[in-house]
Image: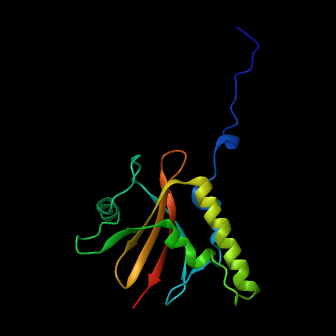
Amino acid sequence: MTNEEPKRSDTAAEIKPLFTDEINPLLADLFYPSESDEPIEPVTCYLNQPEPLTVSQIKDWLMLPPSVYVEERPETEFWAPITTEQDWYDDEEKARTARSGQLKKRLEDELTVRQVFRVGESEIDVYLLGRQADGQRAGIKTKVVAT
């Protein structure tokens, strides 16, 4: 018998905060502009294969019928409306643009293989998804209204 104490691991220090907990502060009062300004929300996705996602996989994940239109779009199109500052912006709009830039940087730092999918035709759900370091997919979603 030895007098050594059993080794302990400080699991609380090893646990990484959930993706949603990390980005929620950046999403507070942040809206995506379209015909109706819509909130941006965190989202997780159980699809965790290493390859980029396909439109078919997105339809399966969201349990959509084949008739629902889904397309992949460039990530730059997603960010342009919320990270580009306009000359006529007031201080509040400039602050919102800066926070959108912080969100963009956080997602670029946290997620690889980022993809943007648009779901629907007039009330369009928009998903920006990527892979976290642990292989799980997460991202953000919003809605764009285009009539």
Q: Position of residue 27 (x, y in %)?
A: 62, 71
Find residue 80 and report its image quarter. bottom right
Find residue 88 and report its image quarter. bottom right
Is residue 27 or residue 110 the one in the foreground?
A: 110
Is residue 19 or residue 31 the one in the foreground?
A: 31
Q: Position of residue 72 (x, y in %)?
A: 38, 67
- Does 87 sit above or below residue 142? below
Find residue 86 and report its image quarter. bottom right
Residue at x-position 47% and y-position 79%: 143
Q: Is residue 25 visible?
A: no
Q: Looking at the image, which residue sits at the far left?
A: 66
Q: Looking at the image, which residue sits at the far front?
A: 87
Q: Position of residue 1 (x, y in %)?
A: 70, 8
- Does 13 sit above or below residue 99? above
Residue at x-position 68% and y-position 78%: 96
Residue at x-position 33% and y-position 59%: 54
Q: Position of residue 63 (x, y in %)?
A: 30, 66
Is residue 142 rendered to the left or right of residue 66? right
